[in-house]
Image (cartoon, rainbow, N blue to C red):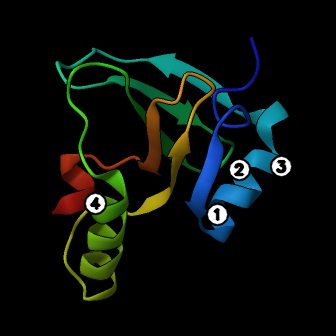
C-alpha cells in the first residue's frame, strides 16, 4: 500500500500540501475513531499534524465547496480548520486534508 496522500489525485491543493507530499518519508499515520460519513486518519510530519478524510461511505458532500468556504472563512479570520487540498483516491472516493485542530487551538 502506498502513501495515503501520494495516492490521491489532488484537484486543488496549496503549497503546504506540496511540501507534505515531498516529505512523505517523514510522515506517520495514526488511525482515528471513524464517523458515519467518512474514514479519518491523523497524519503527522515533523512540524505539523493534519487530518485526512475519505468520504467512502454514504455521505457524499460537495467537498470542493467546503474547501473554498473554509479557505474564505480562514482568510477572514474565522477560526476554522484550514484545508490543504481535496481530490480523489484510486477508488474515486472524495478526499481532503486539513490542519489538525484541537479545542486549545480554537481558543
Q: What is the distance, in whole Å, between disc 3 and disc 2 at their CAs? A: 5 Å
Q: Which residue is mark 4?
A: 66
* Disc assigned to residue 99: none
Q: Nearer the viewer, residue 90 or 43?
A: 90
**Is 87 placed left or right of 64 in the picture?**
right
Q: Is residue 54 above or below residue 50?
A: above
97 sits left or right of 8 in the view: left
Q: Secondary structure at mark 1?
A: helix
Element assignment for label 3: helix
Q: Which residue is mark 3?
A: 22
Q: Residue 20 — which label?
A: 2
Crowding around mark 3 (Cα neighbors within 10 Å: few <14, some 14 to 19, many 20+) is: few
Measure the alpha-carbon separation of dots 4 and 2.
21 Å
Label 1 sits on residue: 16
Mark positioned earlier in the residue sequence (1 or 4): 1
Label 4: few (<14), some (14–19) or many (≥20) C-alpha neighbours in 10 Å: some
> Dots 3 and 2: beta carbons under 8 Å?
yes
Which numbered mark, 3 or 4, is in the foreground of this view?
Answer: 4
Q: Position of residue 55 (x, y in %)?
A: 35, 29
What SS does tag 4 mark? helix
Residue 68 drawn at (x, y percent): 35, 71
Q: Mark 1, residues whose alpha carbon is within 10 Å: few (<14), some, or many (≥20)? A: few
Amino acid at each position: 500500500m502506498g502513501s495515503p496522500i501520494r495516492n490521491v489525485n489532488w484537484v486543488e491543493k496549496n503549497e503546504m500540501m506540496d511540501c507534505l507530499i515531498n516529505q512523505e518519508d517523514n510522515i506517520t499515520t495514526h488511525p482515528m475513531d471513524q464517523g458515519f460519513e467518512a474514514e479519518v486518519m491523523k497524519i503527522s510530519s515533523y512540524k505539523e499534524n493534519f487530518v485526512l478524510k475519505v468520504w467512502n461511505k454514504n455521505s457524499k458532500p460537495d467537498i470542493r465547496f467546503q474547501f473554498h468556504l473554509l479557505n474564505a472563512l480562514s482568510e477572514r479570520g474565522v477560526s476554522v480548520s484550514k484545508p490543504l487540498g481535496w481530490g480523489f483516491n484510486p477508488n474515486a472516493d472524495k478526499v481532503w486534508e486539513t490542519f489538525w485542530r484541537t479545542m486549545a487551538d480554537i481558543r
